[in-house]
Image (spheres, rainbow, N blue to C red):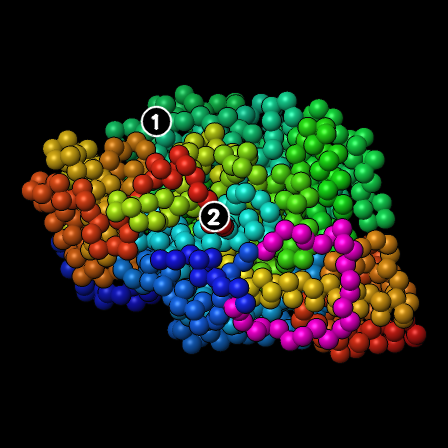
Amino acid sequence: MGGYIPMARCEQEEMLAELGLSKMEDLFTEVPKELLAAPLEMPKGKSEYEVRRIMEDFGRDNKIFKTCFRGAGAYRHYAPAIAKHVSAKETFLTAYTPYQAEISQGGLQAIFEFQTDICVLTGMDISNASVYDGATAAAEAIVMCRERKREKALIYSNCNPDTLSVAETYCKCQDIPYEILPAKDGLVDKELLKEKLDETVSCVLVQSPNYYGMFEGVEEVSEIAHAAGAKVIHSGNPIAMAIINSPGEMGADIAVGEAQPLGLSLAYGGPYLGYMACREALMRRLPGRIVGQTVDENGERCFVLTMQAREQHIRREKASSSICSNQALCALAASAYIASMGPEGLRCVAQQCYDKAHYAAQRLEEVGYKRRHQGEFFHEFLTECPPGPEQVLQKLEAEGILGGLAVDGGILWCCTEMNTRAEINRMVAICEEVALI
Amino acid sequence: MKLIFEKSKPGRGTAMLPPCDVPFAEMDESLKRKAPLPLPEIGEGELARHYSELERRTHGVNNGFYPLGSCTMKYNPHLNEDIAMMVGFNRIHPLQPERTAQGCLGIIHLAEKLYCEITGMDAITFQPSAGAHGEFTGIAMIRAYHQKNGEDEQRREILIPDAAHGTNPASAAMNGYKVVTIPSGPDGCTNMEAFRSAVGPKTAGVMLTNPNTLGIFEKNIAEITDLVHTAGGLCYYDGANLNAVMGIVNPGAMGFDIIHLNLHKTFSTPHGGGGPGSGAVGCKEILRPFLPVPIVSETKNGYTLEYNRPDSIGKVRSFYGNFLVVVRALCYILSLGSDGVKEASEGAVLNANYLRKKIADGKYVAYKEPSMHEFVLGLSELKKETGISALDIAKGLLDYGIHPPTMYFPLIVEEALMVEPTETETRETLDEAAEAFNTLFRMAKEEPEKLHGAPFTTPVKRPDEVEAARHPILRYQFD
């Protein structure tokens, strides 16, 4: 039988008979005859082995790069074996949203631990159970800040392009006015920010490290924005926060971002993991699922989905977001990643990202690939590319290296702990070779 | 059990990375983190036990019957997990050159083709990450369509039945629409008189699921979609209940212009305890220009991502959505094929009707109309008689190892329990579940006090939800 149906047709016929029916069609008498579908033309069902072969062939049509210097919103990090195995546990995998707390304590506690991890990393008071990805997290945060008299969002143009694009979609859909602040030399000028802030502005969305890997000076952004009565939404990289200022320390009101770097594979763009955390004052405006601690009838500590009065199934059209399913399993994976790395391991990942990117930037500079912008950066940086990006990237590709991303006529490079010194040297040598031809 | 933070001891940990092999780079002091970083410090063995214990305190589809209405908790095939874990998909960077990601693009392209056939649509995007996200995307496309035709200012209303999922009105409101609620009639279907008087020049569209949340097929669906089209509006299909009608009748034939699919429901991808899902959005030709960018196109040089689409609503998510969920869903459809798709829906409807009859001989079913893939019990009579509520019955089921049905939904049924068995359950499982329900109904009459105390066998007892909301503790409190 197809459809993973466990029963033989004759059993089903017995069941039909118990219902006083003689054939399957009798179950569908409510469907008007003229609407009934013609038989599907797709191929008939296949055996497990056949499907496996087809899918493996698709896999072979992809090129796996042994070495990768590309980030731009998706980062290759080492995921400990235990972290991967935890999120593959079939009970976590096959459970639904934990509506029944009595039999869902495992999943609920895992989310509570994730919420705590995110609060620690971001320096915020409250985290939700996750949203779809970093881009929708930023967009939801803008919606969260909207007030009747303060509607407008100021958005840094040097956010990740997908974050920018999704934020624009959400603003347009909800008729939220917004303005994109252009960057100069990789950063947005604080004077420009001051100029644009007025009593109609609800929030400023700033990413730091930004798309070019550079630090935006968020403390100052917070001071300026708060002085004008606007909130600050910080979009960041949770790995970086192990060693750099957290958004909480820098005065942000809401911290959002893409948590894929916390041990999730590149996976051609998803599933990823949006995190979303805020100050206590904004707690009841935070969208999405939130897990809270309480006690059961015996006074034992336990966990439940809580503050549901914010959500769509209660508030319907008055809810601030329609989000229901989020990325719970990815949150579990990220939490297991954090626990398996520990604070020292996480600092080590972040520091190696920083060290290796700085080593690579220096080596590239030596062979004529100068950084376009000055200023501090984390693990990504934009260089000029004298021979033209396409030529360099194709040569790297031929050598099994996924080079940086062609951006604004240059190349946006990324290094993580997974890039060895030998890999960096080899990449630099190829870049040099192409430049000399 | 202890939280992972309570198991942490300074100095414990793991060894995952080699020492750095490039010179240390000193960061400017002003950039450095000053706050402490109290993340768990814990050895690997203890960590493994922590998560195994959490797993034991969780209930998944493989632990037992899971008839959670509207969620389609069918078996999640193991093959699909194997395939989704292949390095050939996991190590692919979303910004790799298209010529090096032809396998991924080919998967998206084939999945689009197969899902179009099942749903009667012309194009599909896999960018939305969950059903509600699909709704948001679909309604945004409807609005973009009206904007393009210069009718956005006139068409400000979305019609939604009172039995609809809460996500429907919320998604409409996220697109700036006014929600007009349509009451259900005594037969559980849309009240046609109310509907006719609500449709008009202000109508941007309608959002419906069919079968509806009562598990009843809207017989008048053709008239409904026709009325909306005649008035110049568009019709949105919430695919949460598609498992009832695959290969039987498709949303395109019902007159819908745009739909979302819950790949994590109908198409067997695991729900992960609350995601990741996939809310793929399909549409008819007239709405294709408004799909989110990029779309996957087939050219003579292979598959390519097309970004230059001036009427697109833009992006609704980074990259191309929850790709590995699409991988699993494609495996599923290839396994089922044309025959299995239809058999799955037939099996789902058969199992629902069988269970409906076996539970108190259908006595508590809220609407007597024939059921499709799910049915709703209304226990207000039982409650009046015995004081036992839908919540009590649900909690009682926990002691039988059964995940309770969806409770108190749809809102139009008092003391509702919404039961969706799915096609992957055996007759024995259905018989045992019916026996559990019937025993609980007997208990309600004979020992109501006892049943108020259920569950008795779960890791924790009923939680104090009021306290949780009143005094929120939403993270571990470090000393």
- Quarter-wise, where is residue A410 in the image? bottom right
Residue ranking furthest to the right: A436
Front position in the image: A197 or A54: A197
Q: Position of residue B391 (x, y in %)?
A: 24, 41
Q: Residue at x 75, y 66 (%)?
A: A355
Identified by mark 1, the residue type is Pro
Identified by mark 2, the residue type is Gln
- Tag 1, which chain? B
For mark 2, what is the residue? B477
Magenta portion: prevailing SS class: loop
Q: For mark 1, does the 10 Å Cα neighbourhood hold few (<14), some (14 to 19), or many (20 or more) residues?
A: some
Side of B246 where B138 appears, left or right: right
Name the disc covering residue B170, or none. none
Q: CA distance from mark 1 to mark 2?
A: 47 Å
For mark 1, what is the residue? B183
The residue range painted magenta reads B12-37
Q: Residue at x 59, y 56 (%)?
A: B37
Q: Position of residue A20 (x, y in %)?
A: 14, 50
Q: Are marks 1 and 2 in contact (CB under 8 Å)?
A: no
Front position in the image: A238 or B103: A238
- Tag 2, which chain? B
Give SS at disc 2.
Answer: loop
Vertical placement of B176 versus A268: above or below?
Answer: above
